[in-house]
Amino acid sequence: MKMLLLLVGVLIFSGIGYVRSDASDHRYKEGDTVPLYANKVGPFHNPSETYRYFDLPFCVPEGVKEKKEALGEVLNGDRLVSAPYKLNFRDEKDSEVYCKKKLSKEEVKLFRQAVEKDYYFQMYYDDLPIWGFIGKVDKDAKSDPSEYKYFLYKHIEFEILYNKDRVIEISARMDPHSLVDLTEDKEVDAEFMYTVKWKETETPFEKRMEKYSMSSSLPHHLEIHWFSIINSCVTVLLLTGFLATILMRVLKNDFTKYAQDEEAADDLEETGWKYIHGDVFRFPTHNSLFAASLGSGTQLFTLTIFIFMLALVGVFYPYNRGALFTALVVIYALTSGIAGYTSASFYCQLEGKSWVRNLLLTGCLFCGPLLLTFCFLNTVAITYTATAALPFGTIVVIVLIWTLVTSPLLVLGGIAGKNSKAEFQAPCRTTKYPREIPPLPWYRSAVPQMAMAGFLPFSAIYIELYYIFASVWGHRIYTIYSILFIVFIILIIVTAFITVALTYFQLAAEDHQWWWRSFLCGGSTGLFIYAYCLYYYYARSDMSGFMQTSFFFGYMACICYGFFLMLGTVGFRAALFFVRHIYRSIKCE
């Protein structure tokens, strides 16, 4: 137990504590060495397909050192090594040659393939990101690709802004007139050089990262974001107003009718949702899977709330490398006890006996598909020798976290849930034998109901989805977390209301099997989000290649599955609250 608490403490302080790691707040004197790291290179349109900087045949300086990286940085695909350029503080240089190299035919071919695929590079200077393209393709109005010319940039110009003794901003520009011709497979002499210019600025050190978040706050972007909010709010108001009016009127009529029936002769036949009061709280089939789904969904909902809390207090500022991944791993591990408690407690309320097997199912329900997807995608990344392939040491760390933190907390939560002795609160007694469900039209079956339930919540968030996708699977920066949180709240509200409405209509049709239906209807928005993935990939992005395609659809499948479990839990909880309320309001014999 002491070992578990110690490891939890280490995770909190080294994980979430690291999240604010850009406190490099370094002060320099003139001539001091400022750390410059080369990170990675890769096709601009394929964000997952990145390689180590020196996988391309650049000049490798003596004594190249790899920077030690935190867990989140490694998961993000960062592989920082010392760069060949020397950018000492306030030390200007003009066209200084740092390397002369004769490129072999193989190296020329490798560079040409990289230029053809629009490779970019990324570096970090005093924790500030730098980007640039390694070359260009000269098409010059030529229609035949065989006539294109390929050039490698050999001169990079750095412009650095400083305020007294601190670095504030850096930009890199490739000299368009200093090129190496890569068009033909022949040896080429290349002379790589760089220029460094320093300028003073009044921008304070505390605001140096604001430059990277401004793109999200431009007026035309904010207009679209607020349009998304207004669109979502209108959807919510119309839906909630419509449902509240209909349900209140219908329920009022139902309550009046049932009250009159109780005063009338006993031989009047009951109809509608009161007719099935003896079956509506009959426990669902596959109760262990149902409880495990609720446990996993509750954990993912808690995880999402914690991530939003960190985002709203400013933890995930732009280019805080790996902060989000670190937070996700740490918080998921620490919230596993919530999954165990919820699942075991509800499973025991459903009169389940094999609570140990239920805990195993809870632990594997989300992690299992995620593990299988990771194994396949990591194998693909290893085949491509991409930085997305996790080192063996990182995999061992993740396994240890799962073994020493996630699993014990899951078991402890399960034991606490089993011992809670909570009973299922049902306002009506359940009959011994279930009533037969009358034949229903096709549109009342599960699939049409799921389509209807998923479309409305999706319509409230689809505008914001583009910006999220462009940030996760592109090079945009998303920083307006307050708007995203509002959209998330709207998503939860719409999901709850539409599930309640469909549950009422199902019960009114005397179909008492609402447990799984409410979960499936609530979670169906995840299926719509995955359908949007297909549209985004083929219509809104330029991603291509087997690796990028498999990474995009593989990890998005896991994310949408997580949304399915989380929103399914929200839908069921809302439906359960509603069903208990209406049956508590009438007198059931």
Image (spheres, rainbow, N blue to C red):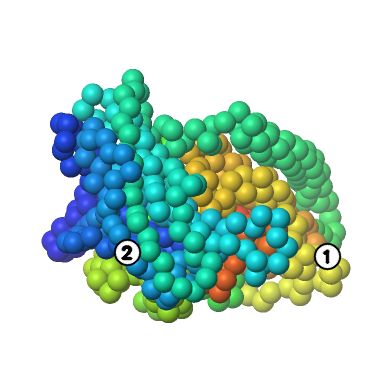
Quadrant containing the C terminus is bottom right
- Tell me which numbered mark, 2 or 1, is placed earlier along the sequence: 2
Disc 2: which residue: 101
Residue 82 makes an appearance in the image = yes
Res 470 label:
none
Tell me residue 240's x, y (percent): 71, 40
- Residue 575 against residue 312 in the figure, above or below: below
Residue found 29% across the figure and 29% down from its top: 162
**Which quadrant holds residue 499?**
bottom right
Q: Dot 2, crowdedness within 10 Å: few (<14), some or many (≥20)?
A: few
What residue is drawn where x is 34% and y is 54%?
192
Q: Is residue 585 visible?
A: no
Of 516 and 60, the residue lying toward us: 60
For the residue marked with disc 2, what is the amino acid?
Answer: Lys
Per the rendering, the mark at residue 443 is 1
Left or right of 123 on screen, residue 351: right
Out of 123 and 522, give the one closest to the viewer.
123
Binning the other alpha carbons within 10 Å of mark 1 as few (below 14), some (14 to 19) or many (20 upward) gives: few
Q: For the residues carrying marks 2 and 1, which lies nearer the camera in this image?
A: 2
Decide which of 89, 445 is in the foreground and name it: 89
Give the residue drawn at x 31%, y 31%.
198
Q: Residue 463: x and y, percent?
A: 66, 45
Residue type for callout 1: Tyr
Q: Nearer the viewer, residue 98 or 111?
A: 98
The residue furthest top is 202
Query: Separation of disc 2 and disc 1 at Cα?
Result: 71 Å
The structure residue drawn at horizontal position 64% and vertical position 58%, both measured from the top left corner, is: 139
Which secondary structure, mark 1?
Answer: helix
